Image (cartoon, rainbow, N blue to C red):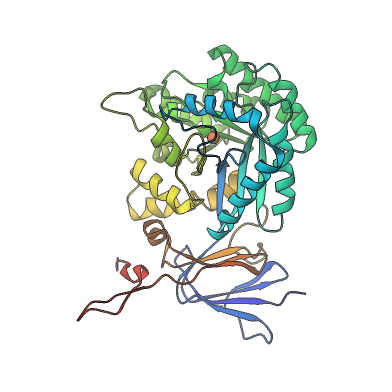
Amino acid sequence: MTSDLIVRNATLPDGRTRVSILARKGRIAEIGTVPQIAGAREIDAKGYLVSPPFVDAHFHMDATLSLGQPRMNVTGTLLEGIALWGELKPRLTHAAVIERALRYCDLAVSQGLLAIRTHVDVCDDRLLCVEALLEVRQKVKPYIDLQIVAFPQDGYFRSASAAKNLKRALVLGVDVVGGIPHFERTMEEGAASVKALCEIAAKRGLMVDMHCDETDDPLSRHVETLASETQRLGLNGRVVGSHLTSMHSMDNYYVSKLLPLMAEAGLHATPNPLINITIQGRHDTYPKRRGMTRVPELRAQGINVSFGHDCVLDPWYSLGQGDMLEVANMGVHVAQMTSREAMRWCFDAVTVNPAKAMQLEGYGLEKGCHADFVVLQAKDPVEAIRLKPARLYVVRRGEVIAETPERVTRLHLEDRPKTVNTADYAPKI
Ligand code: FE2
């Protein structure tokens, strides 16, 4: 039996300080004041931020860590990325996909990222990636909540066997229904794919998470169909529109009508700042569009918005390290969400908001929630986004599953302090 764990002198994301947290039998048994308990392990958080774990609501674990296989993406576009992935697919092996995915999960744990929704390509008759990621989901269950989305990468109608394979994947145990309407042959087929996929989800009682309008084309309006199908089928609160980059380029009047429809349908939105800023706008000269969806406006409408990582070292993105604070940091910049309040919200966009979109049970820093949290070497959420600091302790179900030493630099300068801890530079606002 594992012993109790007590974290003392924690600062919480809501600003509370000098808080103690008691983890018992995998749950938060107390948060606030905790007496001494014989035999309990104690951690001194030293006034640093203790946050619920990071959550990534949008990722591609079948492709991660495959950068350079079989070649690099020269144009940097989404379409060359898809073509490149198509070249790699026949060469994939079950063992190699599992190995890359598990290595990524190790990295995720080291960053305090303990829940991931990954898409898995079902446009391969072998369903090799599906079977591999189902195995990975089982294997990492003690430390990562992994949700898998059946993703018809080459188009639900455009790829001959996608419809059949998507159903096979759901039978095998994939959790969520995906789609890619902007990649179908025509607007009509795109809209039809949204309808067909939402119907499958409704029939099976599943959630939906669609790559939707990941393009600079202002006339790519599949999110409208996604919202109306969500309403028609009573899927409210269970559907995510991912990317939604075309909204960046849409006509303002049209968006003023679209946002309330999305809110009415309880749609969640998951833009992916690192990828959207990198991949979109590639057909532009100058001025060059940012290609990220309208985050402040979605938020103002009451729509639940999360920031996803999407890619790490794969055909679409040659950087990344599983750090959701890097994602939030880019979100702050691209969406120009620079007020203190907006930056605090960007921290939510990589913690509580994606947990809501993924319907994670027992998530949060409240009594009765899972004892899952991260001690960060920063004093508050804004500082965490600024510094992307060390994850001093990563705790899952009341057990420390990763530790990183406090990052302190020794200075060899005369008449100056002997050490620098970047966390000490927090502004006094
Ligand atoms: Fe994606």
Residue 372 position, x and y percent, is 62, 63
In this orientation, which residue lies closer to the viewer: 74 or 285? 74
Quadrant of the rendered structure where residue 181 is? top right
Q: Is residue 191 above or below residue 270?
A: above
- Total labels: the figure holds 0
Q: Is residue 385 left or right of residue 356?
A: left
Image point (42%, 58%), residue name = 388
Residue 208 position, x and y percent, is 64, 33
Q: Is residue 96 above or below residue 13?
A: above
Residue 249 position, x and y percent, is 37, 25
Residue 351 position, x and y percent, is 53, 53
Q: Is residue 397 above or below residue 253?
A: below
Image point (37%, 69%), residue name = 423
Residue at the extreme right of the image, as rendered: 171
Q: Is residue 296 left or right of residue 58?
A: left
Mark yes or no: residue 178 visible. Answer: no
Q: Is residue 263 left or right of residue 75?
A: right
